[in-house]
Image (cartoon, helix red, strand yellow):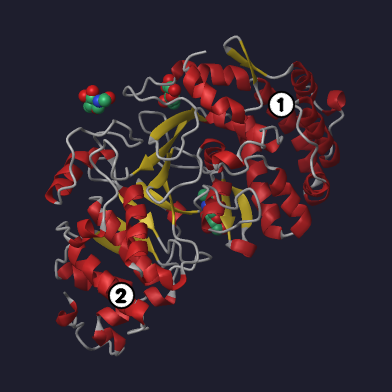
Amino acid sequence: MECRDDLGSILPFLPLILRSSDVFWPPAVVEALKSLSKGPLHSNVNSGHLFALAIADLRNSLGFSSLYPSVSLGFSLFFDDLMSSDEADKWFGEVVPRLADLLLRLPALLETHYQNAGIFNGMVTGLRLLDSQQSGIVFLSQELIAALLVCALFCLFPSTNRGAKHLPPINFDNLFACLYEWDDTSQEDKIKCIVHYFEKVCSDMPMGNVSFERKVLPLENSPSNIFYPEADFWRKSHVSLCQLEVRTTGLIEDQSTEALEVDFANKYIGGGALSRGCVQEEIRFMINPELIISMLFLPSMADNEAIEIVGTERFSNYTGYASSFCFSGDYMDPKNIDKMGRRKTRIIAIDALCRPGNRQYKLEYLLRETNKAFCGFFYQTKVEQYQTLFKENRFLRAEPMNNISSEEYPDDYGEIGIVTGNWGCGAFGGDPEVKAVIQWLAASQALRPFILYHTFNLEVLQKLERVVQWILSHKWTVGELWNILVDYSTRRLKGETNVGLFNWLIPSLYNDDDNDPMVLDASRIT
Ligand SMILES: *[C@@H]1O[C@H](CO)[C@@H](O)[C@H](O)[C@H]1NC(C)=O
Ligand SMILES: *[C@@H]1O[C@H](CO)[C@@H](O)[C@H](O)[C@H]1NC(C)=O
Ligand SMILES: *[C@@H]1O[C@H](CO)[C@@H](O)[C@H](O)[C@H]1NC(C)=O
């Protein structure tokens, strides 16, 4: 098998064994999967209860512990009680046998994968651990992703060594245990999305590719020439602010044109997707389940890192949010395909500070958040322009960056904007006005053409559009807006003000007199 080093880094996290240079399932697993693949008349697996037993047997053959009782009970609850008997017949009669077939083919799919890896623009693209502080990209076919996801459904990934590597759990055991323990309709609907995905890929396997990239803004001692900016860099930036369009309705994932769609991520990508979570990130992972496989090989993000995933397909439609989340049937993904076989759906995972409280107004944390967003938003096609900007601020070093990019040249040039919303403002407790400005600064500095900002009708952002229009009409730079943000935040931290950023910024709005022209207190521009 090619790319032994890549395989070597991921092998401890796969259930396969390596013999000479090829990977295999242990013989007992092959026998059990073959039996499953012949259907319930042969395998006898025709219920959730028996499915859990079959999984426990497979795990036993791999030397893993048996499933917790809640996991088995979760499988029974879903497939025997919640699923209609017609659907269960189809699941056990048609889908499970095909899933078993796909799992049997996992070694061969990996073999083909490593043979093809590393042929795009000279980039290394093989499946490997994309470890912290190492920028890099992995290209996987949708078929290989499907096989790996079946492995997760069957709870066959080894779990013991993941925590030490800062990798989140990847098996679906907890997803089912939470269903049993919490008996929550949103949890049931999350599993419906996953089941729908498996049904769909089994009847018509998608043949595209997906790329997963760890983006790193190197810390100062790196040989790269763009690195983690300091406050001074933002303070002095002369870059113009980009367009910012406000939408009060609509959802990020419904974006029909190509843009970078922000995943309000946990530093462990996927957050609570495979446990009880059901907010923005987790919902995205349920409707685009191929995202889940990022959790297999991407350890948690540091402050100077982001993860960009291009090409996942959306399979499910839904309504609601959190406890009201509801699977609402099939979704035919209309997105175009790029020349690497990826759907033009770009998702950028950036993790905001979690429950920062007043800390979020400290310079150190403003910088952390702005740099985090910048790390997510910068793109390779603009690297020369960034170099010039960094040079102005004396941050430039000589060598060019490595060619690691999930973005395509040259048609993307200048086209790809950011679609986002109230990043880190729900459960994470960020200040929505401050977070909107931070994302605007980061997108502008990354030379993105626009931000489409979904407010989800949040009341405190009602003035966002007017504030943005005012600032744009006065042609502020990134540096000017940064300085205002820092000034406000310093006062907020000291308790000198407790009004929101926009009201502080524009006293006439604070007076709430809509007939007044918007007058900005010029003395506040320092
Ligand atoms: C998704 O569901 C929404 C709400 O039920 C509906 O309006 C929309 O047409 C659906 N979209 C697709 C592609 O099925
Ligand atoms: C997906 O990537 C492989 C290389 O890994 C390439 O050979 C194949 O053509 C790509 N698929 C599509 C649909 O472009
Ligand atoms: C980077 O990309 C450019 C243009 O595509 C190419 O000429 C150059 O050889 C690449 N450099 C590396 C290190 O791969």
Q: Between residues 119 and 488, which one lies in front from this camera angle? A: 488
Instruction: Indicate the position of residue 19 as horizontal and vertical percent values.
Output: 63, 12
Residue in the image at 60% along x and 50% along y: 273
Instruction: Indicate the position of residue 321 as horizontal and vertical percent values.
Output: 57, 62
Looking at the image, which residue sits at the far left?
392
Residue labelled with disc 2: 490
Classed neighbour count for the residue bearing mark 2: other residues with Cα under 10 Å, few (<14), some (14–19), many (≥20)? some
Residue in the image at 17% along x and 43% along y: 396
Instruction: Indicate the position of residue 496 as horizontal and vertical percent values.
Output: 32, 85
Q: Is residue 373 above or below residue 127?
A: below
Ligand 1 sits in quadrant: bottom right
- Element type at marker 1? helix
Q: Is residue 478 left or right of residue 215?
A: left
Q: Is residue 32 above or below residue 296?
A: above
Splitting the image into 4 quarters, where does residue 14 fall?
Answer: top right
Residue labelled with disc 1: 100
Instruction: Indicate the position of residue 521 as horizontal and vertical percent values.
Output: 18, 83
